[in-house]
Image: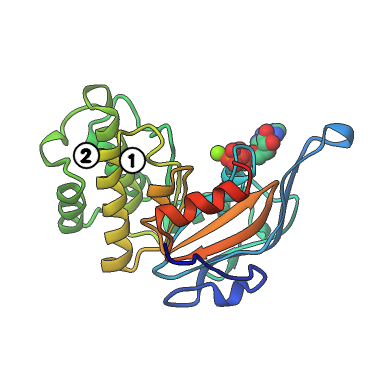
C-alpha cells in the first residue's frame, strides 16, 4: 500500500488545489458554555478550501466537524477567529448578511435531508432559488436531476421517496444554483453503500467537471476516498491532512487517532 501523503497543516494558503481559497478560517474557535462546563468545540482552526477542491473532514464523534461546517456556512458564529467566504469576512456580518451569503453563495446538505414535506422533489430542489427570486437554469437542473437519477421522481413528495432518493433531492438542491461552495454534513450517513457511491461519484463529478468546491464531513473511509484531500479533526483542532486519500490509507490513519 502506498505511503499516505501527509502535509503540515499550518499552511492554509497552500491548501488550494486548483485555485485561491474559496473559503478559509483563521484561528476559528467556538466555545459552548462557560466555566467548568465549557466545551471547546473548535479550538483554533486554520484551514483553507481551494476552488475546485473536494475535501473530506473526518474525526471522532464530538471532534467539532459539524461546528466547523456550521461556523463556515454562517449557520453558527465563532467565539473568536475569522471565517472568510469568497473574500468576505463572515464573522463581521450581521445575521441578515449571513442569510444572504447562504442564499447567494452556499449550498448545504444535511444528514437528515431537511426537505419540505409538502413540496414535490422538484419544488424542493428549486426552493432556495425561488426564495432568492431567481429562475433556475432549466438545462442545468435537468442535468443535475438526470445525474442523480431522479428523473421520474420529480413530482413525488419526500414521504413518497426512499432515503436515498430524498438525499439525492437534498444534494440536487445544494448544487442546482452552482453555489461558490457546498458544505455537506455526513450526506451519505443514512444511505446504503450503492446509493452512497452514486451520490459521492456525482459530487466528485461536480468538482472535476464543473469546478464546484465541496467540503464534506464523513466517518466513512470509502466516502473520504472520493475527495481530493482529507482533513482530520480531534478535540476541535486539525491534527493532520492527507492528499489523494485511499480508503485503506484513511482507515490506517483513523486507527492512529484512536477512533
Ligand atoms: P462532530 O460533528 O464532530 O460530532 P460537533 O461539532 O457536533 O462534533 O460537536 C463538538 C463538541 O461541541 C461536542 O462536544 C458537542 O457536544 C459540543 N456542542 C456542539 N453543539 C453544541 C451546542 N449547541 N451546545 C453545547 N455544546 C455543543
Ligand atoms: Mg456532526
Question: Residue 9: where, in percent of width, then height?
Answer: 63, 67
Q: Is residue 162 above or below residue 21?
A: above
Ligand 2: does it lie within 8 Å of the C-beta at label 1?
A: no
Q: Is residue 127 above or below residue 208?
A: above
Residue at mark 1 to residue at mark 2: CA–CA distance: 11 Å
* Quadrant occupied by the N terminus: bottom left
Along the line of sight, the residue nearer the viewer: 78 or 13: 13
Where residue 206 appears, as percent x and y from the top left, is 29, 60
Name the residue located 40 percent from the left edge and 41 percent from the top edge: 187
Q: Residue furthest top?
A: 159
Report which residue position mark 2 lands on.
122
For the residue pair 255 and 221, the one nearer the viewer reads as 255
Question: Is any atom of residue 205 visible in this view?
Answer: yes
The furthest residue to the left? 152
User: Mark 1 touching mark 2, by CB under 8 A?
Assistant: no
In the depicted structure, whether residue 177 falls above or below residue 110 = below
Q: Residue at x 44, y 43 (%)?
A: 220
Q: Secondary structure at mark 2?
A: helix
For marks 1 and 2 on the same chain, the one whose residue lies earlier in the sequence: 2
Residue drawn at (21%, 57%), measured in percent from left and top? 137
Label 1: which residue?
170
> Is residue 218 shown left or right of residue 79?
left
Q: Position of residue 235 (x, y in %)?
A: 70, 46
Residue 106 visible in rendering = no
From the top left corner, tell me how far across and down residue 250 is, in percent. 48, 53
Within 10 Å of the Cα at label 1, are there few (<14), some (14-19), or many (20+) other Cα atoms?
many
Q: Residue at x 47, y 45 (%)?
A: 218
Whether residue 35 sits left or right of residue 198 in the image: it is right
Ligand 1 quadrant?
Answer: top right
Q: Is residue 125 left or right of residue 65?
A: left
Q: Quadrant of the C terminus?
A: top right
Amino acid at each position: 500500500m502506498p505511503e499516505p501523503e501527509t502535509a503540515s497543516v499550518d499552511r492554509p494558503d497552500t491548501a488550494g488545489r486548483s485555485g485561491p481559497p474559496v473559503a478559509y478560517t483563521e484561528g476559528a474557535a467556538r466555545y459552548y458554555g462557560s466555566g467548568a462546563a465549557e466545551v471547546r468545540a473548535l479550538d483554533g482552526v486554520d484551514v483553507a478550501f481551494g476552488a475546485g477542491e473536494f475535501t473530506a473532514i473526518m474525526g471522532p464523534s464530538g471532534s467539532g466537524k459539524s461546528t466547523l461546517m456550521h461556523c463556515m456556512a454562517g449557520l453558527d458564529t465563532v467565539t473568536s477567529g475569522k471565517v472568510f467566504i469568497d473574500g468576505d469576512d463572515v464573522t463581521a456580518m450581521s445575521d441578515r448578511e449571513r442569510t444572504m451569503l447562504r442564499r447567494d453563495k452556499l449550498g448545504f446538505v444535511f444528514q437528515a435531508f431537511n426537505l419540505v414535506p409538502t413540496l414535490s422533489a422538484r419544488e424542493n430542489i428549486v426552493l432556495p432559488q425561488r426564495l432568492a427570486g431567481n429562475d433556475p437554469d432549466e438545462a442545468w437542473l435537468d442535468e443535475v436531476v438526470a445525474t442523480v437519477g431522479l428523473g421520474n421522481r420529480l413530482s413525488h413528495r419526500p414521504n413518497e421517496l426512499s432515503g436515498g432518493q430524498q438525499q439525492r433531492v437534498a444534494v440536487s438542491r445544494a448544487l442546482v444554483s452552482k453555489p461558490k461552495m457546498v458544505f455537506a454534513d455526513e450526506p451519505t450517513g443514512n444511505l446504503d453503500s450503492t446509493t452512497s457511491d452514486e451520490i459521492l461519484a456525482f459530487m466528485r463529478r461536480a468538482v472535476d467537471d464543473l469546478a464546484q468546491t465541496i467540503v464534506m464531513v464523513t466517518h466513512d473511509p470509502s466516502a473520504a476516498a472520493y475527495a481530493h484531500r482529507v482533513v482530520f479533526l480531534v478535540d476541535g483542532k486539525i491534527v493532520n491532512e492527507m492528499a489523494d486519500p485511499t480508503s485503506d490509507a484513511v482507515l490506517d490513519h483513523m486507527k492512529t487517532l484512536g477512533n
